[in-house]
Image (cartoon, rainbow, N blue to C red):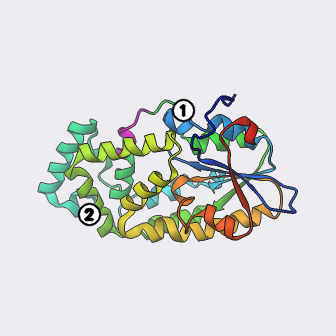
Amino acid sequence: MPDKKTNKKSKTLLWQVTRKGDVYKHYILGTIHTATKEAMTFRALAVACIDKVTFYAGEMNLDTVDTYQLSKHLMLPDNLTLKDIFKEKKYLKYKKIIKKAYRIDLDDYIKYTPFYLLNFIAEQNLLQTASKNLDYDLWTYATVTGKNMQGLETFDDQCHIMQNIPLDYQIKAFKENLRNINLSRKNIIKLNDHYANGNLAQIFKTSKKSMGSIRKLMIYDRNDNMLKRCLDLFEQKSSFIAVGAAHLANNKGILAGLKRAGYKIKMIRTIEDI
């Protein structure tokens, strides 16, 4: 059960969303796509909120994932390999660095995109303590408790995003990450800690910086589309939204968009707040 003694001044990544005159209460949780102990910080409160709603929406309807199609988007195009895009000498250098830092043989992932590898490597910096990452864990709970399952984006939407991340950007980001492994590791650990502390501003700042020139594609454009979907769901029944925390912050984020649409946002820190 959620801790009833949580400090009222503590931060959170869970909010109640209401509008004057409406009978429904909605909830929105900022998630992190990992299975760490820190990722589960707000899980108990989230579950208590899920129990009160009709609709559950993740970033995507996870039941619609086509693993074959997804795998194609994680691979380099035109039969390219990492050895082709980095050239032999650089490839061997990166292979040595990754082997030493993560005990991963780059040859096993030679056909994957640099973007996929960056995310895969990032996970190796964190102690994964749960069997599922937070998004899948909550999706599973909502499914078995009979919620109407929805997605803020479609599977095709997510595939389109992956297709449109420029390869030049991926190569540059990969090189920068390996240039300073220790700094990259520290940044990932800090992000995980920011999540546990409910520090939305720092999560957004870190995510925005890490996205660099693709932040419009990865954050802002998606915010607009997901906000529209949230508003559609809120007009129907009580809903719980689980979406990456970086999409909630800033005046371009989903929370600000909900406020502009006339909704009141209240932080959920304890079971009494629900």
Q: Residue at x 68, y 65 (%)?
A: 259
Spatial CA distance of label 1 from label 2 is: 32 Å
Q: Is the residue marked by circle 1 packed among few (<14), some (14-19), or many (20+) residues within 10 Å?
A: few
- Residue 173 lies, with reference to residue 134, above or below; the image says below
**Which quadrant of the rendered structure holds the C terminus?**
top right
Query: Which residue position is annotated with label 2?
Result: 172
Q: Which residues are magenta?
A: 122-127
User: Which amino acid, by three-letter code, is at mark 2?
Assistant: Lys
Q: Nearer the viewer, residue 82 or 47?
A: 47
Question: Which residue is the extreme one toward the front?
Answer: 9
- Whether residue 154 is visible here, answered yes or no, is no
- Whether residue 67 is visible here, answered yes or no, is yes
Q: Quadrant of residue 157?
A: bottom right
Answer left or right for 157 relative to 211: right
- Find numbered disc 1 in the image and state the secondary structure of the residue it sits on: loop
Query: Which residue position is annotated with label 1?
Result: 131
Q: Residue at x 57, y 40 (%)?
A: 10
- Find numbered disc 2 in the image and state the secondary structure of the residue it sits on: helix
